[in-house]
Image (cartoon, rainbow, N blue to C red):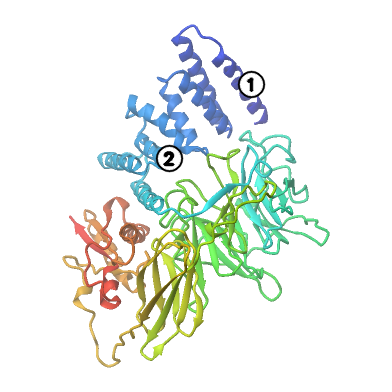
Amino acid sequence: MQFKTQVIRYLFALFLVMAVLPTFGQDSNEEVAQQMVEIADEVMRETKAYGDAKDTYIMAAQMDPNNLRASFMSGVTLLESVTKGAAEEYFMKVYEKDPEYSFDLLYKVAQSLHYGYKFDEATRYYDRYLEKLTANPDYLGNDMVEAMIVRRKIFECEQGKILMEFPEDVEIVNLGADINSKFYDYAPVVDADENIMIFTSRRKEQNLNEDVSDDNLPFEDIFISKKLDNGSWDYPDNIGNVVNTMYHDSNVGLSKDGKELYIYKDENNGDIYVSNIDENGEWSYPEPLDKHINTEFSETSVTLSPDNNTMFFSSDRPGGEGGIDIWVSHRNAKGAWQKASNIGAPINTPFDEDGPFIGFDGKTLYFSSRGGNGMGGYDIYRVEYDSSSQVWSTPTNMGYPINTPDDDIYFTPSKDGKRAYYASVKEDGLGYTDLYMLKVPEEMKRDDPNAVPVVAPAPVVLAPVILTVTIKGSDGVMDAVIRLSGVLGTGGLGANKTSMGVYEFSSTNGSAQEYLLHVTQAGYESQSISVSYPAAGNEAINLSQTVVMVKAKETAPVIDIPKPLIRKSSGDKVRNVYFDFGSSYYHKEDSPSIEKAIGLMKQNPSLMLQLYGHSDFVGVEKYNKSLSINRADKVKSTMIKSGIDAGRISIKGFGSDKPLATNDQEKEGRELNRRVEFRFVK
């Protein structure tokens, strides 16, 4: 393999020389371009040096714009690179000259537009590809993309537009040339005190193997950097040949105290190893985790709770929701890991979940998913564990610009919550992927962290805007579970309890914000109230809100009270399914409705189904529209998993436009509007 790569590299150099030499006409350019395409094709067949093939295809396409193979493969290889949006130029050249060049050409055009944030254009091409699928129902070629996948892409474009319309107010800073190289740098992890950062790099400098891997890039090695007194990160060192080998080694987790480093190795389809650091600062030889963690399937990433007794990790073993899922294991009294269990929905979906990180508070879990309301690839989400109810909250998308249409994964927040570290591809990058630090607005420092301190004007300090919320029940002031979240589920303010039933929220944000106030308590109806938060200024602003909780209705034990007629769908034989506030997971008691719909479609193969998603009126309508689509898509996914062809089911979201009942109250009001309806078409 190495000999073959060297030969191909020699031919690349030869053709680079030929490409810059003066030519004697168009025929010469066409001939050289075709020879370069043949060389690149050989690379694609015999090696994994796709980056070299990409550069050669692009050069050939520029030399001869009429060589459709050169342009098409330029697009194909760009879609496998870190600059996927650049593929649009080459796929469009092919489409303009030969729209039928490949069956999936429309889909590839849409993909490149999607990665380039051109969501409306991408959707149009995805739709045209769906029309082509419908017109060619018997086509089964390798270049056919299933309708279910395409519809998911259209949904991601819709989510992308929403997330970009409501961007998160964060600052993302490249960690600079001292940390990043011109190669791949990724998977950063830090200890609780942020004294050390460990990450994976494919740089040539300090790499234990002077040779290259089969993709003609250096092997993965693990590097470590230490925090300097001025707050910047020191130049990283290779962690050494006890942890690293001559081949691929990648870190995937670090205990909060920085003493246990977790490493991924390709052995046994992918296993997790652990290395411990002793009092002298020496790392031990990595040892594989036991059978409760490592299996014959793939285990790819890991994170430990602050007390080191709970492990969350990702695996594609059977028994999950589908694809790669997040699993959890606990140490027993002897320090051994116990049998792992799937963390379940709503965190795991039929798509892949990976890169978990349990926060320093022990209850906030960050992870990446290809499902949910993402805008493409892996998106980063956040959930919180409620120890009283022993359930996880609905996943919250971390928003744009943290998330992009490409993969966003391995998000590592600091202990104080002021910073987070992750890898990304951005315009200010030094290489393929770089390490970045994300800073939340209140903690932003506008000066260069590596610069020598200078005398600067005193920062403008805004007076706080304080919202005081009083909760009242039937017997007077009462405590409750209260939170203030952004209208899209992201962001929010923390509550400070000042006395029984009285809570304060404080903000010094210089711009006005819209929030949702959620109040829940056992035995009472949940409340969700829109709150307009003004911008902070020179003088303090005090707001107040009283929430009167209404006792939940109780059903008398003797009298059989039927459900209201309004809960039945009109014109269908299948009853609606319903959802909790802000959730796209239907009530378990409504599962028989979905099972009945599945039975009807299996009995009648010609029957088609339209799923109509709806929401209540609380929150921003664009978010409600997105949520209603998510709800319909969740029901559709359940039916597909039961064997129903995805092409027989279409979905549509109406947001809050078509309520069944009043939105003035929760019970038999807003709860009835959070639904999915079934409409069968013969």
Whether residue 511 is visible, yes or no, is yes
Kindly identify the amino acid type of the residue bearing the numbered disc 2: Gly
Question: Could you tell me residue 423's position as x and y percent?
Answer: 58, 48
Q: Nearer the viewer, mark 2 or mark 1?
A: 2
Question: Could you tell me residue 41's position as x and y percent?
Answer: 51, 26
**Tag 1's secondary structure?**
helix
> Can you say whether 313 is above or below 119 in the image?
below
Dividing the picture into quarters, in which one does residue 131 lie? Answer: top left
Question: Could you tell me residue 198's position as x and y percent?
Answer: 68, 52
The residue to which callout 1 is attached is 10
Kindly identify the amino acid type of the residue bearing the numbered disc 1: Tyr
Dividing the picture into quarters, in which one does residue 43 lie? Answer: top right
Whether residue 142 is visible, yes or no, is no
Query: Where residue 354 is drawn, which disc sits there?
Result: none
- Residue nearest the viewer, comparing 570 with 467: 467
Q: Residues within 10 Å of mark 1 (few under 14, many from 20)?
A: few
Q: In the displayed orientation, state which residue is furthest to the left.
A: 571
- Residue nearest the viewer, comparing 617 with 494: 494
Could you give the CA–CA distance between mark 2 and mark 1, rounded to whole angstroms?
34 Å
Question: Could you tell me residue 17's position as x and y percent?
Answer: 59, 16
User: Quick one: quadrant of the N terminus?
Assistant: top right
Dividing the picture into quarters, in which one does residue 439 lie? Answer: bottom right
Q: 337 left or right of 74?
A: right
- Residue nearest the viewer, comparing 308 with 641: 308
Q: In the displayed orientation, state which residue is furthest to the top.
A: 24
Residue depicted at x 37% and y 30%: 92
> Can you say whether 590 is above or below 198 in the image?
below
The residue to which callout 2 is attached is 116
Q: In the displayed orientation, state which residue is furthest to the right.
A: 280
